[in-house]
Amino acid sequence: MDLSPREREICREILSGALALLSQAEQFKNREKWEALPELLSGEERLELDSEQLKLLLSAFNMYYLLSQKETDKLSRYLKSNLHQPEDMAAYFERARAALGENPLEPEACQLLRRRLSAALKDFSSARRFLPRKLYISDLHFYHGNLNFQMDQRGFGDEAQMNARMIRQWQEHVHEKDEVYVLGDFCMGTGEMANIILRQLPGKKYLIIGNHDRYLEDRAFDASLFQWAKPYAEIQDRHRRVILSHYPVFCYNGQYKVDGAGNPKAYMLYGHVHNTLDEALVNAFIRQTRAAKRPSRYEAEPRPIPCNMINCFCMFSDYIPLTLEEWILTDERRRKEMEDVPDSII
Ligand SMILES: [Fe+2]
């Protein structure tokens, strides 16, 4: 398998996690107690496994315990509804491993299990299948050659060079199983021109319609190249709500929601303003909002107002579709460097 270091790390976590879970389940070999497994698995942290990770864990359980289909289905349902947050998987498995310190597997059983799990892992043709991601990008403006000399000043010699670079960046960073949400202004060409570009871009593509996506009305455009195209959407990305709109939404659904640790549960991703004065004005609004506090009848102290608006303009990511986590970091870095809007304008 051709694996990146990150994918190797994920595979290692899956394998060691599966081992820990199986070791923990060793005490249920008599089957009478196996139904107590959900209780053991449940913890304060909720984890998320994607379907391929689930499949591996379930196949491991199947192989080792020869569970019936009914039992496997039950475990699958439990795992799907109770485990979220894949980034915490390693910590969770570490806890599971510590919990079974008093009752370790026999060395031979451990070896057998390792062999079987390794074989299960090899069954997957590519570890990329474990890692479908949600990616976001905005305002690519394919074929819009003027952007090299006006507004964005992209710096390519012509639109062909610009298109080629954007296609290459996409192809090098997006896997076929990824979902890519384009936040509008994808292409300035005709329907057929948009078809030519979209057919070269891997991944499942979703379009939030922008003011320049006129190729959508061209009968030559192949609408099946996008999974859907709509002006606004709200999706889930690892237990967070993501508001998707071409235009900035200043008061968005779920804005005040945070989890128990105070982390935001909603983000608003937008495009349209590129890196213009309009974006500087949006940034001024974001800073003012974050500095404001809102009184609450339930709390003694007023609380800061969350404002998690992120401009996913393609030039901010060197034309690479990024995950939400990557956009959060990119946005934080960029906003620190942004110049203040002159007082004369606001
Ligand atoms: Fe645009």
Image (cartoon, rainbow, N blue to C red):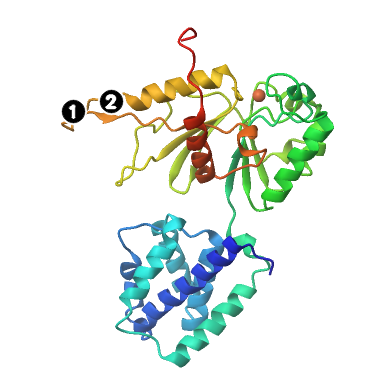
| Rendered image quadrant of residue 252 | top left
Relative height, residue 16 to residue 172 (above, below): below
Relative height, residue 5 to residue 290 (above, below): below
Q: Amino acid at mark 1?
A: Arg
- Answer with left or right where residue 120 lies relative to residue 159: left
Report the number of discs: 2
Q: Which residue, given by chain and number where applicable, does mark 2 sit on?
A: 293
- Answer with left or right where residue 226 lies relative to residue 92: right
Which residue ends up furthest to the left in the rendered image?
300
Q: Secondary structure at mark 2?
A: strand
* Mark-to-mark CA distance, 2 and 1: 13 Å
Give the crowd class for mark 2: few <14, some 14-19, many >=20 residues within 10 Å: few
- The answer to whether residue 221 shows anywhere in this view is no
Query: Which residue is nearer to you in this view: 245 or 289?
Result: 289
Relative height, residue 72 to residue 103 (above, below): above
Q: Give coordinates of residue 10: x percent, y percent.
A: 54, 64
Q: Secondary structure at mark 1?
A: loop
- The answer to whether residue 167 shows anywhere in this view is yes
Residue at image point 62% right, 46% down:
179
Q: Give coordinates of residue 99: x percent, y percent.
A: 31, 75
Relative height, residue 12 to residue 298 (above, below): below
Labels 2 & 1 near each other (Cβ < 8 A): no
Q: Which residue, given by chain and number where applicable, does mark 1 sit on?
A: 297
Residue at image point 36% right, 31% down:
306
Residue at image point 47% right, 36% down:
332
Q: Give coordinates of residue 30: x percent, y percent.
A: 36, 86
Q: Amino acid at mark 2?
A: Lys
Question: On residue 329, which mark appears?
Answer: none
Q: Is mark 2 within 8 Å of ligand 1?
A: no
**Image quarter where ligand 1 lies:** top right
